[in-house]
Image (cartoon, grey):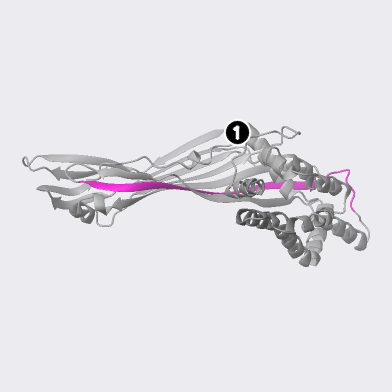
Amino acid sequence: MVRHREQDLRYLKIGTYVSPIGPTTFYRQALEGFRRVCDDVIGGYPAPQDFSLMESFSFYPTLNCFGNNRTWTDCPVGYQPAVPDPRTFYPALTGLDRNAKAWEILAKTNPSKPHVSLPTFVGELKDLPGLVKGYGDNLLKNVANGYLSWRWAVKPMISDLRKLFNFVKAVDDRTIMLMRLRAGATLRRRVQLGSSVDLASPQVNLHVHSEGCAVRGTFQARYAYKAWGSAQWKLLPESVLPQLGFGPLREKAVNLTLGLTSHEALAAAWELTPWSWLADWFANTGDLIAATNNSVGCTWQNVCYMRTSEATLNCVYNTALSDGFAITGLRNQQYNLRMLRKERYVCFPVIPVPVPQLPILTSGQWSILAALAAQRL
């Protein structure tokens, strides 16, 4: 059963403004306070359900000053924008989004996923000399070549070497995981899916207040999010892990840790294919290959995508274009407009083939494209 709950603790702020034409008092009102809206599903436990929680808070500054033969007493400012919504930058997931997130979560939580892919590591070594040899004949090409060398050669190698330094611990952890699966336990695995902070284009020199005095300011919205995913894995009834002795189980753990499996050879072939990284920006081929790696023999359930997002609106008063007494009358008060969203989406990999999508490129991806374009100059 879907349950919708709302909690509204807003109140009406009323201030006075006395004009020079007489004792008439004009009231200016502002609706402020806290609001919470929650949508969830009850009765579905232990299976996860979609969940949405929205919390917003609004507070507008007030004028307490005298100038131009006028008096303001706890008077809310004229410009009262709505609370910004994080979904302006991070919209709700569509059906295709849920499908893509399910494949990504399964790929990253898969118990068969190697700690470091030795076939890919060895295959990429042949590209290292070509990436780090000679730089271009101008500064722009030097910078672009240096960035690409770091991005595609040096950084992945450092990452793999750091993982290899923890090889013994990784094998021990993998052995314990196999023992738990063999005993019939359900693995609950969680993976980080990124975070971001984004600033909207500032709205310059807006009128904060214009009734009897001038106050101007620059408004800018800030958006941030953090996302993670979870999935549960359990050994298939027909799967058989080494039962007798510790050696065979540890040997399997070593092979899984290094990616010495037939399926990982397929994954390495895709990773070494020219421009496969660009294809993965527009289709989830790499995630499909990683998610379907079933070298251990497990089945999955309860795939969820969780996200916490926040939006705030900040104002910087423009003292040069504002009346001094009005700025003083604000008494260092600021707009306090904030919205927080906590969301859970139950995901399922409905489409078992790569689905082309137009991605929203990150700053890192744009820098790669810019470096590649500079190489062509």
Q: Is residue 293 magenta?
A: no
Image x and y of residue 182, in percent: 84, 53
Q: Main secondary structure of the magenta part?
A: strand
Amino acid type, residue under disc 1 in the picture: Thr
The residue positioned 74% from the left and 46% from the top of the image is 107
Image x and y of residue 327, in percent: 23, 54
Image x and y of residue 336, in percent: 36, 50
Magenta-tinted stretch: 214-241
The furthest residue to the right: 244
Q: Nearer the viewer, residue 348 or 10?
A: 348
Q: Nearer the viewer, residue 152 or 322?
A: 152
Using the rendered view, name the quadrant where residue 201 is placed: top left
Q: Is residue 223 magenta?
A: yes
Relative to 144, 221 lies left or right: left
The residue positioned 57% from the left and 46% from the top of the image is 307
Relative to 336, 141 lies left or right: right
Query: Badge 1 is on which residue?
Result: 94
Quarter of the rendering occupied by the N terminus: top right
Determine whether 65 is above or below 280 in the image: below
Image x and y of residue 358, in percent: 62, 35
Element at badge 1? loop
The residue positioned 43% from the left and 38% from the top of the image is 6
